[in-house]
Amino acid sequence: MIRDSHLLEGWTAENDPTIIRESHVLESWSVENDQTMIRNSHVSEGWTAENDQTIFRDSHLSEGWTAENDQTMIRDSHVSEGWTAENDQTMIRDSHLLEGWTAENGQTIIRESHVLEGWTVKNDQTMIRDSHLLEGWTAENDQTIIRDSHVWEGWTVENDQTIIRDSHVSEGWTVENDQTIFRD
């Protein structure tokens, strides 16, 4: 079936019901390759759909939205002030959204030092606090805690709650290797 341009003003159907509409039917709609839609920028102001419903919005549709590769969203910095989503809903917030938040690789959060003054979260909720948060706390490798000597004056916790106290905490106590106690 081929419709001439004066039937529905620009309709053309080719190759068993693949439809191609001319630009003056719905103002620049084009449908190609078995219902794959391509809208020109002046249909819904910047929508573009390519390769089986993959959507591209131009920056003037919702002010900087871009969707690529099967609904993967990328927002430009002026949508929600610094949000960027890449690779299937992985979120990356720029430093001026919540002042230094960054989320990468499936909701892994990294806060820069000026959010809560020295917090850093790496590798799926593993926490590392800088020395100026609680004065020397550091948590590494899935909640293993290492306190610097100026928190409780000489406490150190290493390797999954194994405790080592320096000589000036209880004057010579040392705990090593899963609660084995050595007194100096």
Image (tube, grey):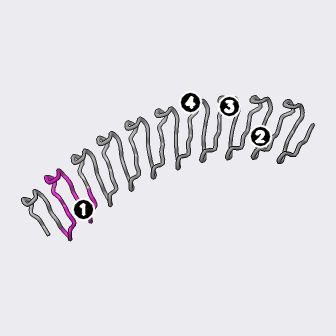
In the picture, the quarter occupied by the N terminus is bottom left
Q: Residue 11: within the magenta?
A: no
Q: CA distance from mark 1 to mark 3?
A: 60 Å
Q: Quadrant of residue 150?
A: top right
Q: Which mark is residue 157?
A: 2
Q: CA distance from mark 2 to mark 1?
A: 64 Å
| Circle nearer the N terminus (4, 1) | 1
Kindly identify which numbered label has been placed on residue 131: 3
Residue at numbered disc 4 = 114
Q: Quadrant of the C terminus?
A: top right
First along the sequence among labels 4 and 3: 4
Q: Which residues fall within the magenta stretch?
A: 14-37
Depicted 177 relative to depicted 167: above or below: below
- At mark 2, the secondary structure is strand
Q: Is residue 68 above or below residue 32?
A: above
Q: Is residue 6 left or right of residue 12?
A: left
Residue 133 position by quadrant: top right
Q: Is residue 84 left or right of residue 128?
A: left
Which numbered marker is on residue 32?
1
Residue 179 in percent (x, y) is at 84, 45
Which badge, 2 or 1, comes first in the chain's sequence? Answer: 1
Q: SS for tag 1?
A: strand
The residue at the point 52 percent across, 34 percent down is 100
Q: Report the Cα–Cα distance between label 3 and label 2.
A: 15 Å
Disc 2 crowd rating (10 Å Cα; few below 14, some 14-19, many 20+) is some
For mark 3, does the 10 Å Cα neighbourhood hold few (<14), some (14 to 19), or many (20 or more) residues?
some
